[in-house]
Structures are given as C-alpha cells and as structure tokens.
Image (cartoon, rainbow, N blue to C red):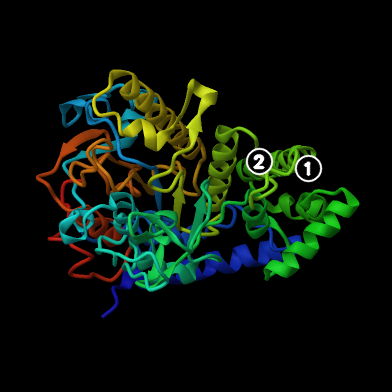
Amino acid sequence: MNHPRHNRNLAAERHYSMGRRQFLRGLGVCLALPAMESLFPRGLMAATTGAPDALGVGGAATTATGAPLRMAFLTFANGCVPGKWFPTGSGRDYQLNETMSSLAGLKDKIQVLGGLTDHSADAGPDGPGDHGRGGGTLLTAVRCKKTAGADFRAGVSVDQVAAQSMGHLTPFPSLQMSCDIVQNAGGCDTGYACVYQKNVSWSSPTSPLAPENNPRLVFERLFGAGATAAERQNSLLMRQAQQRSVLDFVASETASVSRNLSVRDHQKLDEYLTSVREIEQRIQRAELASNRRADPGVDSPSGIPDKFQDYLRLSLDMLVLALQTDNTRVASFMFAGDGNNRDFADIGVPDGHHFCTHHHNDAALIAKTCIIEQWYVAQFAYFLEKMEATQDVDGHSLLHNSMIMYGTGIGDGNRHTHVNLPVILAGSGGGTLNAGRYVQTNDAPIANMYLSMLDRMGVPAIERFGDSTGRLADI
C-alpha cells in the first residue's frame, strides 16, 4: 500500500513538473532552468514535514524536503600513493594528508572511506590486466570477461541501476562525461578490451555507455534547441552563421517570464543565464584556438581547450549546471580512464601518469605521482566548491542534496592492488549522510556502499549488487 505522504509527494512533484514545463513553453525553447522557489509548489515542502521514513527521503530521487537528490561518480586513474592519500586520525578528529590538502575548506562536507575493496578486479586465474579489470568493475562490482575482442562482458553499473529506476523523472536519465579518449574497439591492457578502461557506465553486461568528451556536444545537448543530434547541429550552425548566442533566441521571453519570479529567483535566473553564456564563450574560444592550430593527426573534438585544467573545469561546470537544472539526477564523469598515461608538463611533471605510478619506491617518481594526484584532487575540490556555492530550491546547497563519489578501482598504484581503495564520498545526501569524517571499513566491498546509495535514491530495495555482502551502514 502506498504511504499517504508519498502520494502527496508524487502529486506535488507532478505540479512542480507542470509548472516548469509551462515556464519553459513561455521561453519558447528547450532551455534548461534551475529549480526555483517560484515554481516549487508550496505543498511540496509541507508534504514532507511529517514523520520521515527510515532514510528521511520523501520519494524516488528526492530529499526529505522534496528537492531533487543527485548521485554522481567522478573517477580518476591509476590508484594512489596510500601514504600520501589517507588521512591521519579517525572519525571527526582527522587530518587531511598531503594529496587531499585542497579539500581543507570542505572537510566537513566529505567522508574519506578507508578499507573498501573491489575483489572482482583481483587477478585470480586471469593474470595481468589490472587497469582493464579496475576500470571495468569499478561501478559494476562484477568481474569482467577477459577478452580483447567484441565479446566483452561486465555488469550493470550502479549509476544505471539508479537511472533505470528513476531516470524518467528528468530529461536525461543519466549523463556520461569524460576528459579522456573514447575508444571502444581493440585491446588496451594485457588481453582486456579498451571498452573496460574507457567506460565506467554500463546499461547491461554487454552495453557500455560511451561518455561524451566533446564540450560543445555536451553544451548543445543541455542547452541547444532540438530533440535529436541532427536538429541540435542545425540549430548550432544557424547560430554560428548569425554569430548569435543560444540566449539571444530567448532574450525577450526570458524578460517577460522573469517578471513572475520572486526577487531571489530573478537573481538566480540572472546568475544562471550568465553562467550559460560564460560557458558558451569558453567553448567558442577553444574552437577558435583549435581552428588556428595545425591538424594534430588524431581524431579529437575541436573544442577542447589547450590546457587540461581548462578542459576539465569547463566540463565540470557543465555538470554542475546539468544537476542544478534537474536535467539529470545521475551522472558519471571520467577524469581519465585507468591506465591513462597523460603527461602533466603544465604542473612540472613531463612524465606520463601511468609511468610515474610504477615508481618501484623511487623517491623522485613517488614525488611526481603525488603532484599529479594532488592536482586531480584539486579539480575535485573545485567541483565541490561550485556545488556548495549553488543554492538549491529548498535553501540548501546542491552539494548538501547530493551524493558524489570520487575514486578509482586500483588501491596502491605501484602494486596494482584492489584493496583499501582511495574513495571519497562527498555531500550530505539531503541530510542522510554523516559527512565530515574519516571512516575505516573492515575490508567491505565497495558494492556495499553502492547499495546504501541506491537506498537513498529511492531505488526499490535490492538484496545484492555485484559482489556486495550487505549495506554499508556507517556512512
């Protein structure tokens, strides 16, 4: 039997969705907008003020206030140097180590989880190939088939379990992004297909969801006009020919409709439109710069900024807007696929990342590896700071109303272990996560954490995910 409060929540959500659709029709285009209190039904907050359920969640992918609850998985490559990654102390009395120093201002917004394992990526009888297994099992927790051919097989990833349950609530059931090369053919790691390292999201054991690594295409998908890729391309070509912004086509409608917004929402709309335009200009500058460069002889998107940090942060900014506008509540973002050997000359490390991680205890290579790892965490901190600074419809921050995992499928990058994985869980999950701690688990499968996250997303209870042994209660 449905709970009366849950029925009220669903009714309120329908009114909320209708209000947003009417607002969008007033704009005349499919421009995504952030959630605003002027469009947020008064009954939605009231509907959730009764006795909460076990998790305090009012419905599928919502918080106890009725605001959207987001789930995102940000992944990096090649494990870590454990002695520089994990904090000292325990519980709330913990001190960040060298690699996580950029998270100092967010210490009360994150949980550092120690002791998580991914034994589905262990070598076993399959021998070498830890980067392939680490990438293929990270979000699936299912041992992937060792093959370099097209007969690859993994499992359904945690983000897609959520998307298949509640993706109908948003324009995009999920969003997959990457700042790495997309390569789904051929072998990459000692008998393992490239598909395992270049994808973390799987809608079925044989269906990887290729991430989008072209900033322009992500922008057009989120903010351009048109229901299909061809329609969005035609719209883009028209705008480029006329040298106009996507916002130029909605200027008068925006001015008209914004008169019905509260003062706070009017300011939020102005800030949002400014962000959209600023991102559009950054993509345009990258495209112009790309057109002036000599052909590199490789197939890569033309709009990628020269500097990796600019590329990564441009993509992260669009992810923030995708979550803010409720275009999706589920996302995965690969900073780099496992085994990635990008060099970091811009920050003083001309050597490849993968090469540095195989340091064999050489002090100079360890130092270079730590510089790269610290740089990656700084980009994660940038994303969290943006999420924390963005107010959600219920007055909390986007970060408060989110669950953001940052991690990888290899523990010690030098030894290729799959125990004591470097994992951070950020956000408060709408008030259901106990942030601000360093928590040591007793060699718990990372899949146990995924089960607990799925519970909070309102996914109908499942007994097991991958190699899980139960829920991870202490998060």
Which corner quadrant holds the N terminus? bottom left
Instruction: Give percent across and percent down for residue 346.
Output: 55, 24
**Which of the 4 image quarters holds residue 144?**
bottom left
How far apart, in angstroms, are the residues tagged by discs 2 and 1?
A: 25 Å
Q: Is residue 1 above or below residue 413?
A: below
**Which of the 4 image quarters holds residue 97?**
top left
* Residue type beneath disc 2: Ser
Q: Horizontal placement of 376 versus 265: left or right?
A: left
Count of numbered badges drawn on the protein: 2
Q: Look at 19% across and 54% down and name the residue there.
A: 122
Tell me if mark 2 has few (under 14), some (14-19) or many (20+) residues whose alpha carbon lies within 10 angstroms of its own: some
Q: Nearer the viewer, residue 472 or 364?
A: 364
- Residue bearing mark 2: 275
Q: Which mark is residue 32?
A: none
* Residue type beneath disc 1: Asn
Q: Horizontal placement of 267 versus 281: left or right?
A: left
* Residue 55 visible in the current orientation: no
Secondary structure under tag 1 reads helix
Instruction: Give percent across and percent down for residue 50.
Output: 29, 59
- Residue bearing mark 1: 291
Camera-side mark, 2 or 1: 1
Q: Look at 67% across and 51% down and name the residue there.
A: 216
Q: Nearer the viewer, residue 249 or 43?
A: 249
Q: Which of the two discs, 2 and 1, labels the residue nearer the N terminus?
A: 2
Name the residue furthest right. Answer: 242
